[in-house]
Each structure stands twice: as C-alpha cells, then as structure tokens.
Amino acid sequence: MTTQPPTIHTLREALNAYERIYMPSRNFAPKTRQSYGDDIRELVLFLQANDCTEPGDVSLSALQGYLADLDRRRLAGATRRRKTYAAKSFFTFLHRSGHLPGNPAEQLIPPRSEQKEPRVLSKVEYQALLRVCSHHPRDAAIIELLLQTGIRLSELTRLELGDVELPGRITKDADTVGRLHILGKGRKDRWLPLNHKVCRALKTWLEVRPALTAALFVTKFGQPIGPRAVQQLVRRYLTEVGITGASVHTLRHTFATHHVAQGTSLRTVQDVLGHASLKTTSIYVQLAQEAVKRELQEHAL
C-alpha cells in the first residue's frame, strides 16, 4: 500500500514540510538549513504579498519578480544566487513529493556572482601576524592552524580533542607529522597532516588549555569558542600589525596560494582544502603567479 504525502494547502505548510522532512532527508549541513530556511521564509512573504498563498499559485513569472526585487534591493550577486538555489530546492521538493504537478522554479536562472579576487597575505604579512600572537598560546594555535592547513572557520570551531593526533616527538622529519580529523562540507570526513610548526603551537596550547569541555579551543570561561570570537581575535591581530582587507578566510586563501606557488600539486591542495572539484582549486594558480611577482618585488636584491 502506497503512503500518500500529507496534504499541503499553504506556502507556510509547505515551508514547514520542507524544513521538517526534506532538509533532514538530504542531510543538509546546519548552516545550509539555517540559510535556506531564512531565504525561503523571505520568499514566502514576498509571494504572499503578491497574492500567492498556495504552492499552486506560484508561477515562473512570480519567482522572476522575486529575483528582480532582490536586484532592486542591491543584494550582492552571491547572495541572490544562494537565494535562487534555495527557491529551486524548495519547489523541487514540492514537485517531487507530489504537492505540485510541475516545478515553476525549474527554469529559474541563478544570477552570476561577482568575481572578487581573494585577498592573500604576503610572506611578510603572515609572518608579522604569527609574531604578534605568539605570546598567546590559544590564539597562536588557532592562527597557526588556519595558516598551515587552510581549514574553514566552521571546521575549526567544530574541532574536539579527539580530532588531534600529535607525534610523541615533534621534529621536521616527514615521518613525525601529526594528524587532524576534519568534518567538512556535506559532512565529509578527511584527515590532514600537521607539520611541525602547527604541532608545536597545538602542544603549547594543550599544556595550558582548561579541561572543562571536549572542544579543542575554548574561551577564558572554558566554553567552546564560537565563529564570531575567532573572527574577532583574528581581526584584532590583523589590525595590530596594520594588515587591511583581510579576514579569517584570507588565511585559507593564503595557505593555498603559497603552497601552489612553492610547487605543491593542485590535487594535494584540493584534498587538503576539501574542495569537491579541482576547478575550484585552480583559482590559486593565477593567485600564486601574482604572489611570486609580489615576493620578487618585495625582496629585490
């Protein structure tokens, strides 16, 4: 006997079913669930204000009107692109689950994202950043880890003690590297090697770290450190050494760019960064070429 899907009468009911059934069934990451949920709530409000209260009321032209409204509000291309994909996901769910005979969002074209060249720290800049935080074990370990592995902010704040494996003896020998377990985008696991610099920084932090929680990095109150706190501490040190236009994510770009410039293979960099496609990683080839030119200028004989 085939189970019929629960009847959905309104867009509000559709949103509730999408959040309660579809997103968990697709194993969306928590951040994706939050952003897509917020985006679709905004879309539903727009549609209701334009006399679309039921899923069957929604047409392609109504959704295009929503995209035009986002443009009038001068939202960034990347933001409008995400909101478009959220809308497509929502109506794909309604169509495939039998609540709509067709998918009005199927032909909805996402706008292009603005291509903004990533900021990359020069060797002089990242060395200054490491020096300024060197007397603060936790902060030094955080910044060293971001620079030496290129992990994302969300990945760093999810780290627990059990995710770190340090060698008994820390040396520059290739056989004595540490390991770091990462739960990345799409909840995909990967293990990253930890070089001697980050191993030393982590060892120093672990020697003074309060033992009140399983989180690797904690606040002065012993609570797991959150993304905003990491952003603030990195911003503080960047400001202290006079580095502008940079953020936590800049450290990820810096890691990848300097490794490519020094000959690390794109495939290796892709695996470490957790990119699904090598095409995403290939942007660092041009950035590496620019970094080499900059270094030659800065260190002219």
Image (spheres, helix red, strand yellow):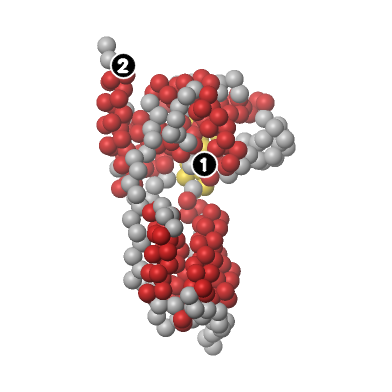
In this picture, is 174 found above or below 165? above
- In this rendering, the answer to whether 53 lies above or below 75 is below
Along the viewing direction, whichever of 189 and 51 lies nearer the viewer: 51
Residue 122 occupies quadrant: top left
Locate the N terminus by quadrant: bottom right
Q: Are marks 1 and 2 in contact (CB under 8 Å)?
A: no
> In the orientation shown, which residue stands out farthest toward the bottom?
1
Q: Which residue is mark 2?
A: 299
**Which part of the image, by quadrant, shows the C terminus?**
top left
Q: Nearer the viewer, residue 92 or 197?
A: 92
Instruction: Residue at 49%, 22% (x, y): give it.
Output: 241
Q: Amino acid at mark 2?
A: His
- Residue situated furthest front in the rendering: 72
Q: Position of residue 262 (x, y in %)?
A: 31, 28
The amino acid beneath tag 1 is Leu
Camera sees residue 198: no
Q: Which residue is mark 1?
A: 153
Residue located farthest toward the top when viewing the structure as drawn: 301
